Amino acid sequence: MQSVDEIVQASLEVKKSLFISYLVPLHDFESLHSRLKLEHPKAAHIVWAKRSLNEYAQIVENNSDDGEPKGTSGPPVLNVMRGYELINVGILIVRYFGGIKLGTGGLVRAYGSSAKEVIACASLKAYVTKEAVVFTCEYPLIPRFEHYCASHGLLFERKFEVHYAHWTIQMSQEEKEAFLLFAHPFSREGFNLL
């Protein structure tokens, strides 16, 4: 599976209709969709599709034709996303009608081509599934775990309790195995995996 870290934009013109497409990380999808509605009030349609993983590692998909004939815009975009195995991303396509009707087959091709165009402009990265690793450590160990996280590029959430700090870190399986090798010797000094 693949994903993106930043918003990518591309344009395509088909029979005088302009298609402006955006490939976006899922966490930016809703805000970009709202912004596009404000920035393109004269656009005929803002079609979208998105794919994500839920907490059970199942793929969740959704799409919208936004007033285009049913099945001619959202589903073709979603099919392109499936073909590239994109996950935790969305594609939004703004269409300005050029005065020439494309027909159902033309719409399917135009929206599919727009999705392919924006994906071609993106720097796709391999998607790595991460899980939450939760642990506590006593206060004297905090600098060691802070240093480990900083040197391995791990982002963490931490809460301070009376006698210890409570940590949550999102890690891939490989990162988790390396972390547990590092942390195991501290079990006698106040490290507890939850």
Image (cartoon, rainbow, N blue to C red):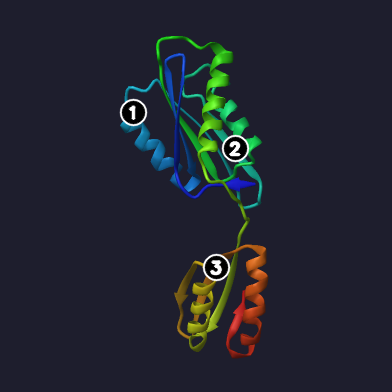
Q: Secondary structure at mark 3?
A: strand
Locate residue 74, reporting x and y percent: 54, 27
Residue 79's tag is none
What residue appears at the point 52 percent right and 74 percent down from the top-left corner? Answer: 151
Please give left or right for residue 54 compared with residue 14 in the image.
right
Give the residue type at disc 2: Glu
- Which of disc 1 and disc 3 is earlier in sequence? 1
Determine crowd level at label 2: few under 14, some 14-19, many 20+ residues with C-alpha closer than 10 A: some
In the picture, measured across the screen, residue 5 lies left or right of residue 43, that is right
Quick one: 62 or 149, which is closer to the camera?
149
Residue under pointer 1: 40
> Which residue sits at x=43%, y=17%?
17
C-alpha gap between disc 2 and disc 1 = 25 Å
Question: What's the amino acid at mark 1?
Answer: His
Q: Which residue is mark 3?
A: 169
Q: Which residue lies at the image location 41% right of the left edge and 36% below the top edge?
A: 33
Of residue 8 and residue 70, the one placed in the foreground of this image is 8
Residue type of the residue flagged with mark 3: Ile
- Neighbours of disc 3 within 10 Å: few (<14), some (14-19), many (20+): some
Circle 2: element type: strand
Residue 82 placement (x, y as % from top left): 64, 36
**Residue 13 in picture, x, y percent from top left:** 45, 21
Foreground: disc 2 or disc 1: 1
Q: Earlier in the sequence, mark 2 or mark 3?
A: 2
Q: Which residue is mark 2?
A: 61
